[in-house]
Amino acid sequence: MKYLPIKQQLFVKNRERFCKLLKPNSIAIFNSNDEMPRNGDQNFLYRQNSDMFYLSGIDQEQSILVIYPDCVRKEYREILFLRETNEHIAVWEGHKYTKAEATEASGVKNIIWLDSFDSVMKDLMSNAEHVYLNMNENIRLATTVPYRDVRFANEWKSKYPFHKYERAAPLVTKLRTVKSAEEVELIQEACNITGKAFDKVMRFVKPGVMEYEVEAEIIHEFIRNRANGHSYNPIIASGASACILHYVENNKPCKNGDLILLDFGAEYANYAGDLSRTIPANGKFTKRQKDVYNATLRVMKFATSKLVVGTTIDAYHAEVCKKMEQELIGLGLFTIEDVKKQAPNAPLFMKYYPHGTSHFMGLDVHDVGCKQELLQDGMVFSCEPGIYIPEEGIGIRIENDILITKNGPVDLMKHIPLEVEEIEAIMAKGK
């Protein structure tokens, strides 16, 4: 791992909170992620299962966390099963956790090598009544891949068919949506690294650079600041490409007069940052570009002010859309009379603003959470309105990451330039 060590107390507290949500005489099992095949004999770069990391701090493949709070034998109330290293693994793959290192990282005292998993679990399962199995229940998930949790659940239910099975995901989701102070610090670091990359980009960009060159500047700044890498595939969209919401080709030239929509974020210690900015390739906004940018910025500031305890994302988004409608009328994209005639299920603003304003953030950039849930102190959200006018080749999105507190929203990216004048001044210096 590139990131600095995290104090084990974060994961100890997370497990303590999780245990309070379990039914009596329950055992919970959490698997690490698959090592995903890329092609040939190569795997994709490994990324730990977010729930596994949240409860253990273990950032290594082929690991299993077992939690059994009511176990009669105290030493089996928490167990980490880890892959035992050997000389061959050390030579070909490098260092793996020792038992002492795993305890230091996680706070779990009982570390057992993975080849003993079945024998140990046979004993524990004979006494447990409820079994909590984990699954990726993120509402955005769409996959046909039978990933490790799915395979394990099928295998375990076949092996032990008469236990009472429960879903772990709703419990972990409830915990993960509200961030502890330690987690906010990690997210803040991801935001800080993201800001450094944006500063570098502003000083680098000029007419003629390729989108992939901009992407290269970003990843360079991420890695040199201990980030894992990108928290999602970066969007570097110049000109009309900015109107493609998930444009990731990043292979076109940034032409004089173009705007460049940048949507990227660093991942630090598996926690995500998520930033969007739109800058002029030549360092100077035109009058129309500035007008659209400032309209988007006004919506963004309004939206930020509405991210408060007690509202819901759905209710908040409805308010933001009303503000967006006013701004789009001000830009001359349609009129008040047009709005009066619009179909109720097809509002005119959706042509120019077709996406949501915010999503949960944390260990995943699109983190777990329910949009109908009341916002609570400690939740973190993106705030990212955008205006897209394909016929003018203008696409603008502005996004910061916002912490919800009982005293109002806290912008974790408030130090990152946002105003037209700031951006133009920095880009002028970079030339």
Image (cartoon, grey):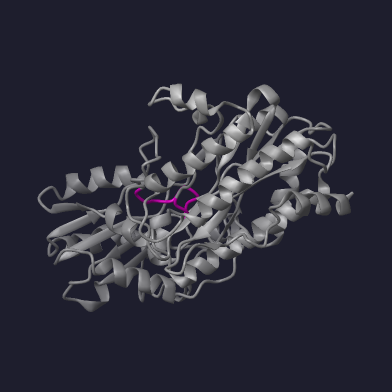
In the current view of this chain or complex, which residue is farthest to the right? 431
Could you tell me residue 360's position as x and y percent? Answer: 44, 51
Q: Is residue 171 visible?
A: yes
Could you tell me residue 431's position as x and y percent? Answer: 90, 49
In magenta stretch: residue 368 = yes
Could you tell me residue 221's position as x and y percent? Answer: 72, 55
Foreground: 183 or 389? 389
**Mainly helix, strand or loop, the magenta region?**
loop
Could you tell me residue 202's position as x and y percent? Answer: 78, 49
289 relative to 163, above or below: above
Foreground: 333 or 256? 333
Q: Is residue 102 visible?
A: no
Q: Residue at x 82, y 48 (%)?
A: 204
Q: Residue at x 29, y 63 (%)?
A: 66
In the current view of this chain or complex, which residue is farthest to the front? 337
4 relative to 60 in the view: left or right: right
431 relative to 301 in the view: left or right: right
424 relative to 403 in the view: left or right: right
What is the span of residues highlighted in magenta in the rendered image? Answer: 360-370
In magenta stretch: residue 332 = no
Foreground: 217 or 345? 345
**Residue 283, image quadrant:** top right
